[in-house]
Amino acid sequence: MADKTLNYSFFNPNTVEDTADFLMKLFVEVNRPKVDAAIRKAAETSPGLDTFLSNESSNSAEAIE
C-alpha cells in the first residue's frame, strides 16, 4: 500500500510585518532565560556592567509592559 502524503496549508490574514513582529516577540520570550543567564555572566566578568544593566532592565521592563 502506498504512503499517503499529507499537505498542509495555512491562511495568515496578517501582514508580513505583523507576522515578523509577533514571531520576534515569541522568540525573545522563549529565549529570555538564556538571555538573562548570558547577561548575568557578562555582568559578573565586566566591572560596572551590572549597574548599567540594572538601569537598562528597569527601563526595558516598563517599555515591554
Image: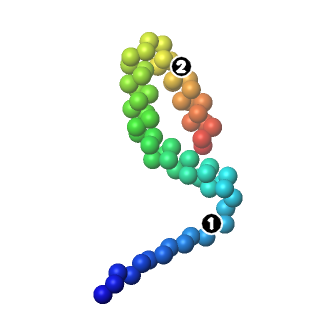
Q: Position of residue 47 (x, y in %)?
A: 44, 12
When asked about the image quadrant of residue 18, the answer is bottom right
Q: Residue furthest bottom?
A: 1
Q: Residue at x 44, y 35 (%)?
A: 35
- Image quadrant occupied by the C terminus: top right
Name the residue type under label 1: Asn
The first of marks 2 and 1 along the sequence is 1
Q: Is residue 9 above or below residue 16?
A: below
Q: Taking 62 as reference, is 41 left or right?
A: left
Residue 21 x/y as whole percent: 62, 49
Residue 52: which numbered mark, if any? 2
Identify the coloring.
Answer: rainbow
Q: Is residue 40 left or right of residue 54?
A: left
**Split into 4 quadrants, where in the image is the N terminus?**
bottom left
The amino acid sitting under disc 2 is Phe
Q: To which residue does mark 1 refer?
A: 12
Where in the figure is residue 50, as x and y percent of width and height?
Answer: 47, 19
Q: Is residue 16 above or below residue 24?
A: below
Q: Position of residue 2 (x, y in %)?
A: 34, 84
Of 58 and 9, nearer the camera is 9
Q: Secondary structure at mark 2?
A: helix
Nearer the observer: mark 2 or 1; the answer is 1
